[in-house]
Amino acid sequence: MLYVIVAEDIENSAELRSIYSEQHRARISTLVDQGRIFVAGPCPKVDGVELSNAGVSGSVIIAEFESETDAKLWLSEDPFVIHGIYQSVSLKPFKKVFP
């Protein structure tokens, strides 16, 4: 089943993101290689501004997991979760309807 993960960053997360971004992206790349990522990416703080200039307010990931338990386990091992970059994380089952 697909699950949507919506994460909100702590204030001034840019430095921590830069430290752990490679590890975070590597984990997501593994899901991409397995064909399990529907969409994933950061949420810029300001529309139309480069990420490096405005910063990031959080992330959205929609990915396929066997169960909610598996999704929670995967999420708990993410470097952004482990190192406190996300101040809150929401995980919900997701059903694609359109397009």
Image (cartoon, rainbow, N blue to C red):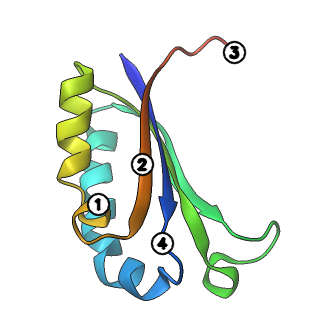
Q: Is residue 31 left or right of residue 97?
A: left
Question: What's the CA distance linking mark 3 and mark 4?
Answer: 32 Å
Name the spot of residue 3 as percent of width and height, x first: 41, 27
**Mark 3 or 1, which is nearer the eye?**
1
- The residue type indicated by label 4 comes to Ile
Q: Which mark is residue 98?
A: 3
* First along the sequence among labels 3 and 4: 4
Q: Is residue 12 left or right of residue 16?
A: right
Quarter holding the C terminus is top right
Q: Are marks 2 and 3 in contact (CB under 8 Å)?
A: no
* First along the sequence among labels 2 and 4: 4
Residue at position x 54%, y 61% from top? 58
Dot 2 lies on which element? strand
Residue underneath mark 2: 89
* First along the sequence among labels 3 and 1: 1
Question: What's the CA distance linking mark 2 and mark 4?
Answer: 11 Å
* First along the sequence among labels 2 and 3: 2
Dot 3 lies on which element? loop
Name the spot of residue 13 as percent of width and height, x first: 47, 79
Q: Are marks 2 and 4 in contact (CB under 8 Å)?
A: no
Residue at position x 17%, y 53% from top? 77
Dot 1 lies on which element? helix
Residue underneath mark 1: 81
Quarter holding the N terminus is top left
Residue underneath mark 4: 10
Residue at position x 37%, y 82% from top? 16
Question: What's the CA distance linking mark 3 and mark 1?
Answer: 30 Å
